[in-house]
Amino acid sequence: MARLKKSYGQHLLVSEGVLKNIAQSLSIEEGDRVVEIGGGTGNLTKVLLKYPLKELFVVELDPEMVEKLSQIEDERVRIIRGDASKLDFCSLGGELKAVGNLPYNVGSLIVENVIFHKDCIPVGVFMLQKEVALKLTGKGEPSWLGVFLQTFYESEYLFSVPPRFFVPPPKVDSGVIRIIRRENQPSLELKGYKAFLTKLFSMRRKMLKKKFPQELLEEAGIDPHLRVEQLSMEDILRLYNVYEVKR
């Protein structure tokens, strides 16, 4: 087995049952193009290749793992050595189904990058640290990234995975989520919207009037004494639209 490195946040999923469940959750159909994030030693890659996909891009940063993955003999496989938190997914072509056991230390950054490439990623199934997975599906503590994701994707928590299914076992449980791109998305400038959300969720215990001018909140029809976790998605979008005009 290739040597695992802490710096890459590597925990290899070795449970055949869980690997099959992840692949099945992606609903791969004939002719689909799939991008696997963090191919590792190819455990999930080999399961995905049992499906009638047309092309499988496998993104991996660790050169040792890239070497191991390149030994897979299947003409549908394209190995990409790169950082999935910075990769231009749309450069791989049109509609891509994304899947992966995301490294704990950069999982959130990868999800953020997927959102920035939402136009070419209609579906994703990801394993993350359970706490992060719950936040992203609206089941945990609200977060700016959870709202950012849920603005453009429907997100669903599928199942939990205990540490014993990994080598080496992580210290926490993992969670698998599925995201499906919304058909009726708001048309927003993504960088500006992200900056607004990070401002909105900063210093969370403070009332909104401490973060935004009172007249702006009133124009958006939002009580200045509320805190961010008390806002609905509709409230957030309404506030953002007023904020953008006034900026």
Image (tube, helix red, strand yellow):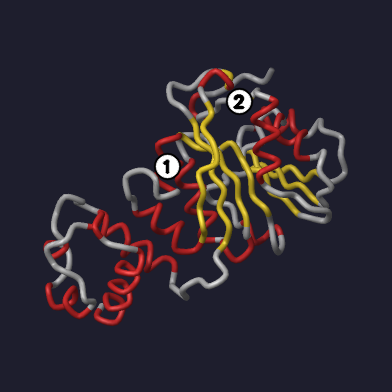
Front-most of residues 11 and 146? 146
Front-most of residues 79 and 114? 114
Label 2: which secondary element: strand
Residue occupying the point 41% across, 59% down: 148
Residue type (three-letter) at the residue carrying disc 2: Leu
Q: Which badge, 1 or 2, is on the more N-terminal residue?
A: 2
Where in the figure is residue 95, as x and y percent of width and height? 69, 62
Residue occupying the point 32% across, 45% down: 141
Where in the figure is residue 212, as x and y percent of width and height? 17, 68
Question: What residue is pinned by disc 2?
Answer: 12
Question: What residue is pinned by disc 1?
Answer: 134
Mark 1 or 2: in front is 1
Front-most of residues 217 and 27? 27
Residue occupying the point 68% across, 27% down: 17
Label 1: which secondary element: helix
Where in the figure is residue 126, as x and y percent of width and height? 57, 42
Residue type (three-letter) at the residue carrying disc 1: Leu
- Within 10 angstroms of label 2, few (less than 14), some, or many (20 or more) residues? many
